[in-house]
Structures are given as C-alpha cells and as structure tokens.
Image (cartoon, grey):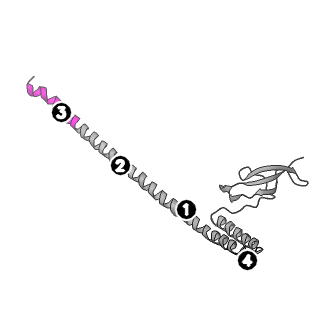
Amino acid sequence: MTDEQATDPPTVESAEASELRARVAELEDRWRRALADFDNLRKRVARESATQRDAERARVAGLWLPVVDNLDLALEHAADDPSAIVEGVRAVREQALDILARLGFPQRSDVGERFDPAGHEAVAAVSVPDTSPGTVVQVVRPGYGAGEHLLRPAAVVVAKGD
C-alpha cells in the first residue's frame, strides 16, 4: 500500500465529516434565528397586549365618568333641595346599571328561577307555602352577567322542602 492510498480514505471521511459539520452549523444557525424570532414575537405580543389592556381600561373608565359627574352634581344640589337627592341617586343608579349592561354584565332578575349554584349563592333557605323546593324566593344581593360571563353571582334566599 502506498502512502497515497493510505491517505485517500481519511480524505473521503474528512469531506463527509466536513459536510456534516457544515450541515450542523447551518442547522444551529437556523435554530438560533428561530429562537430570536420567537423571542421577538413574544416581546411584541406582550407589548400589544399591554397596549390593548390599557386602551380597554381607559374605555371602561370613560364610560363611568358621566356617573361620577352626575354624583358630583347631586352632591352640589343636595343642600338646596334635600328631597331631590333621592331622585338624583335613582337616576345615577340607572345610569350605572346601563353601563354594566353595555359592558355585558346586566343585572339579573332571579326571583322565581330555579337555584343554580353556578349563578347563585344561597344565603338562606326558608319554607314557603306553594313554592317548590330550590326556587329563588328573594334576592339579597343581585348578580350581574349571564352564562359564562358572570361578574358576580346573586346572593339569594331559596325555598326549602318541608
């Protein structure tokens, strides 16, 4: 065997190894770029999410400004005509309920409904003639929202069986 023949196989292996090293380097480069792209995407989504959250908070707060304005007006005029304050408070309450409804959380009317632990919180059970057990007979604290969009369950008194 000559010296040239002895060195040929390592040269072939060396070329294959060199190709493999180049392929590994290319894949590592693509992997690093993908990681950088993913990190940039994560940062962009976090920024956009924060911007959207701030805009929504400002929109909701803006809806409540007329309520605050009307409460201020009611307080200003309370000294002039104390009886008018009750009517003013009722009007502001209706305004607040309208805002909650527009935000997707209408006040619920649960009297006469079947007790549902997903939307009601039982605070008492009472015997009520001619009322089937498990029926809501009184709302102690109203609930807001509907279905999966429940802001707060209603605190209710439920009819119990004798």
Q: Closer to us: mark 4 or mark 3?
A: 4
Q: In the image, what residue type sits under mark 2?
A: Ala
Q: Closer to us: mark 4 or mark 2?
A: 4
Frontmost residue, 123 versus 145? 123
Bin the neighbour count of mark 2 within 10 Å (Cα to Cα): few under 14, some 14-19, many 20 and up: few
Bin the neighbour count of mark 3 within 10 Å (Cα to Cα): few under 14, some 14-19, many 20 and up: few
Q: In the image, what residue type sits under mark 3?
A: Val
Kindly check if marks 1 and 2 are in contact, taking CB atoms under 8 A apart as contact. no
Frontmost residue, 131 versus 19? 131
Quote the CA–CA distance across marks 1 and 4. 36 Å
Frontmost residue, 129 versus 9? 129
Q: Is residue 72 magenta?
A: no
For mark 1, give the secondary structure. Answer: helix
- Position in image of residue 120 (x %, y %): 74, 52
- Look at the picture and state if 24 lies above or below 142: above
Q: Residue at x 78, y 54 (%)?
A: 156
Q: Closer to us: mark 3 or mark 1?
A: 1
Q: Which residue is mark 3?
A: 12
Please give the label number shown on residue 36: 2
Q: Which residue reaches farthest front? A: 79
Please give the label number shown on residue 57: 1
Q: In the image, what residue type sits under mark 1?
A: Arg
**Mark before the other along the chain sequence, 1 or 4:** 1
Q: Residue at x 69, y 73 (%)?
A: 74
Quote the CA–CA distance across marks 1 and 2. 32 Å
Kindly check if marks 4 and 2 are in contact, taking CB atoms under 8 A apart as contact. no
Quote the CA–CA distance across marks 2 and 3. 36 Å
